[in-house]
Amino acid sequence: MNTLSLSASKHSKSFLNLLKPQTSKTQSSIFLLSHHLSTDPGPETEPNPKPNQSPKDDDLLITQAVELLQPNEKDWNFDQLHHLLFSNSAAPSPRSLFHITRRLGASSKALKFFEYVSENVASPPDSTVSLSSSFQAILELAKREPTSQNKLYDLYKMAKERNIPLNISAAALLVRSLGMVGMVDEALIVFNDLDPGLKNTHLRNAAIDVMLKSGCVDDALKVLDEMFDPKAEGRVDQVTGDIVLSYLLKREWPGRSFSEEDIVGLVLKFGEHGVFPDSVKLTKLITALCRNRKTNKAWDVLHDVMKLGGDVKAASCNALLTCLTRCNDFKRMNELMVKMKEMDIHPDVVTFGIVINSLCKSRRIDEALELFEKISEGREKSDGVSTEPDVVIYNTLIDGLCKVGRQEEGLRLMEKMRLQNGCAPNTVTYNCLIDGFNKVGDIERGCELFHQMKEEGISPSVITLNTMVDCLCKHGRLNSAIDFLNEMQRDGVKGNAVTYATLITSFCNVNNISMAMELFEQMLRDGGSTDAIVYYSLISGLSQAGRMDDAISVVSKLKEACFSLDLVSYNVLINGFCKKNKLDKVHEMVQEMEAAGVKPDSVTYNTLISYFCKAGELTTGHRILSKMIDEGLVPTAVTFGALIHAYCLNGNTDKAMKIFREMGSKSKVPPNTVIYNILIDTLCKKNEVELAISLIDSMKDKGVRPNTATFNALFKGLKENNLLEKAFEFMDQMIEHACNPDYITMEILTEWLSAVGETEKLRRFVQGYEVAASTA
DNA sequence: CGGGCTCGAG
């Protein structure tokens, strides 16, 4: 526990420190950086006026010249023109030529003027700069004209023939514009023709942009490499970084592929040159790495960017935190938060949301509530801290409470959130609560809340629908579920794949395959455009009903419709074949999924581990577990459950208990109801009822809901040992937890209680009254 | 660009 410094008692302090007003020493540098992050290359540079001519003189000249050039080019008065421009000993400045040319409006007219000037101006090289300026103006005009595509390149060829060099602005314009209209080869010719001295950062950026967008990735990388040379003209700048990174962050790269290592390598290389991804891009990169299970890479790149002096914002840290949460890596979560404080990165409301969610998901709901209180207090203080809990944080907590059976508290929290500005309950709030009450069997309250939300004008979502449908199905009220669905559809909430998957699976479970098929057809009909997910749900339902032949025939239908199986479908099929003990089919499926490029996930591994463990092949089970860990997957409660189950079956209860304890201490995976049930059942059978009872208590502490099977296992043990008072106690608890007795419960209790003359207590129990109260 | 709710494994 001590290594886990997420615990609120320790952390609340550091969080409060983080919330203190900050000395803003980083403030100004952040501002500067964000200014540099702009991708706008800045205004086109205009030629400088001649040193001996003031811009004012220049402007007069420009106005007069444009006046003279106003008429159609046939009617130009060349005498006056010559007098104005060339009678002076000083030729017109490049700046004035640029402006005169540009104000002629049309490129054809501008070109005529350009011809006139080139005939009258002194011979090169003296006139080169002037002519280049005029030429730049022609390009700018031509670019705006509708048929510019070929015109631009023709103009370039003309300039080249006449040995009129491009200035930087003209070159950049050509490269960009040609690239934009798809004349990539031409754009690259322009770039490659350029004098190396002219290839400044701006131009190289334009060229790299064109190259990347057209798939000439290797060319781009070559230019980029030159830009990394410390002696080079045109070093990388922020814009270079933006262009290259935006490209790398795309889902696919035309023309080449990049590994995560390549991308991270480039980011760091930019970093060494003082160029960093902006917050959005860094966050995207980290999110992408995390999605591809490269948590370590994500961790490294974030820390390296910090080390190199990049500006890291909370969002990027949040992305990594989310990923660490999913791996239950509390140690590094904590390390990262310490680092954030060190680097003066303020945690924001999302950061707190992630931490609170992480605590909730590990069932450390009270610590989550404590942290929540601390943040709320911080809001009251007048130190300018603006982290107040938002709707998401409230919802996270309400869901956390509901998930551990504290739905009444969840309800109270909803009332509390109404008192906070801008924190009105929303659809998600109600979804959590409805599910909370439904899951403990209190459908009445679930329905009540459902009507309440509608009265409040909060529209139910498809998740609300699915929550209700699932609950009705789990209680065997399949027809009510269908009615509910129809009613919601009338109100405009259409069922989705989850809805149908739930219904189809439920009908398969009660062996009503024809109804399942009918729903399948209905969804195909209603769905408008067919979706593969329709097939998935039926395959899943049939597999779980053990009808593997039917499932496989639906697979063929799916393939005929040109869909392919997804990860979940492979998982349910593998599970189905495992249950049927068809090992050859299991192998076939695993091979097929690998060939299809579908990577097995923890569910796949759990299914296989559980299969081999149950079959008594513990060695194979452990071997698959190692492979799972090698693949970067984290063992889940199901994984541990499979191992624990295996050792229980094996008679090795001590080993099972050892794994169970390690779950809490080493792995931080919260055990679930099934694991408790296995252990309680096994311990009772071995006559270790005391230990079994202590496990029930630990369930309460950890917020794991017992179910009917939990109590059944316990009652069997209590009956063996004739612990009647204990039995009454747990009968009350069963009522408290809204666990309905099933036929097994009734069998055990009827036999036992009739034998000892306690039939009255049994009667009250069946009617849902507390048993202990009946004695009073 | 980052955090919340339903369903698919044991």
Image (cartoon, coloured by chain):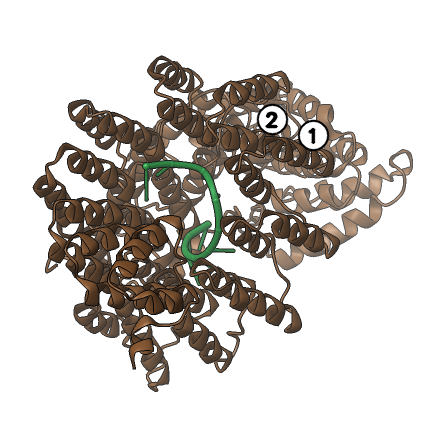
**Viewer-proximal residue, A751 or A555?**
A751
Q: Which residue is mark 1?
A: A118
> Mark 1 belongs to which subunit?
A
**Viewer-proximal residue, A279 or A676?**
A676
Q: Which chain shows up in brown?
A: A
The answer for how far apart the CA atoms under marks 1 and 2 are is 10 Å
- At which x and y percent is residue A496? 61, 43
Locate the N terminus of chain A and report the quarter of the image it occupies: bottom left
Is A516 located above or below residue A364 in the figure? Answer: above
Res A728 quadrant in image: bottom left
Three-letter amino acid code at the position of disc 1: Ser
Rendering colour (chain B): green
Mark 1 or 2: in front is 2
Lateral position of residue A16 relative to residue A498, left or right: left
Instruction: Determine the secondary structure under disc 1.
Output: helix
Instruction: Determine the secondary structure under disc 2.
Output: loop
Whether residues under marks 1 and 2 lie with C-beta atoms below 8 angstroms apart, the answer is: yes
Three-letter amino acid code at the position of disc 2: Ile
Lateral position of residue A416 relative to residue A463, left or right: left
Q: Residue at x 62, y 68 (%)?
A: A451
Locate the C terminus of chain A and report the quarter of the image it occupies: bottom left
How many marks overall?
Answer: 2
